[in-house]
Amino acid sequence: MQTKMDLRVIKTRANIKSTFIELLSKKAFTEITVQNILDQALINRSTFYKHYSDKYNLAEQLISEIMTKATAFISERFSNMKDDELFSIVYKAYGYAYDNKKIILALWKIRTDKLNLYDDLQCLLKRYCMKYITNHSAGKDSSLVDYYSTLYASLALTTIKWILESENEPDIPKIIRHLKHTFGEKFWSLQ
């Protein structure tokens, strides 16, 4: 009996989350009410409140799930990256982001004081880039590490956002070649 209960909980949460993401694709976060979620998910108020305290808590949990996955993904990519692969992470991240495209694009629309997935991802990328540059530029001038890391995080995330929002399937290898050519090794040399 416990297994059936767990399965129902999983299905209910999945229903609430997918309904919320669907609503975010149609409306601004500020316009969505718990009642909108209830009506579209075909659940009652008590069911919603068993799982989430409000729409902010729901959004927070969804963003936390994406950030947990993104942290693991980015950590692994940066730790296994060779010196010439800094922009190749965009190609690898695209696959991950594309698999979660609808959720990511919907959650990027939420911008409150506490909830901002886009900025959170940018900070995460910046932090890992700073660590990467610091570890790969021993003995070189490090006065611009913060600048380069900020630029990299902005460029990488903007590129991924542009790719996800594109109507047609973009030529990812071509984009990566262009990034490498424009912001190649000399850009990161810290001389």
Image: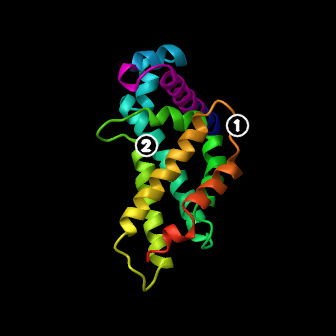
Q: Is residue 50 above or below residue 114?
A: above
Q: Nearer the viewer, mark 2 or mark 1?
A: 1
The one nearer the camera, 59 or 108, is 108
Three-letter code for the amino acid on which mark 1 is drawn: Glu
Q: Between disc 2 and disc 1, whose residue precedes?
A: 2
Dominant SS of magenta comes to helix
- Quadrant where the C terminus is found in the figure: bottom left
Q: Is residue 155 left or right of residue 115?
A: right
Circle 1: element type: loop
Q: Is residue 29 above or below residue 188?
A: above
Q: Which mark is residue 4?
A: none
What is the distance, in whole Å, between disc 2 and disc 1 at their CAs?
A: 24 Å
User: What residue is pinned by disc 1?
Assistant: 169
- Quadrant where the N terminus is found in the figure: top right
Bounds of the magenta segment: 10-32
Residue at the image position 44 percent from the left and 16 percent from the top: 36
User: What residue is pinned by disc 2?
Assistant: 117
Q: Quadrant of residue 19?
A: top right
Whole-percent x, y for residue 37 in the image: 47, 20
Circle 2: element type: helix
**Residue farthest to the left, as pictured:** 113
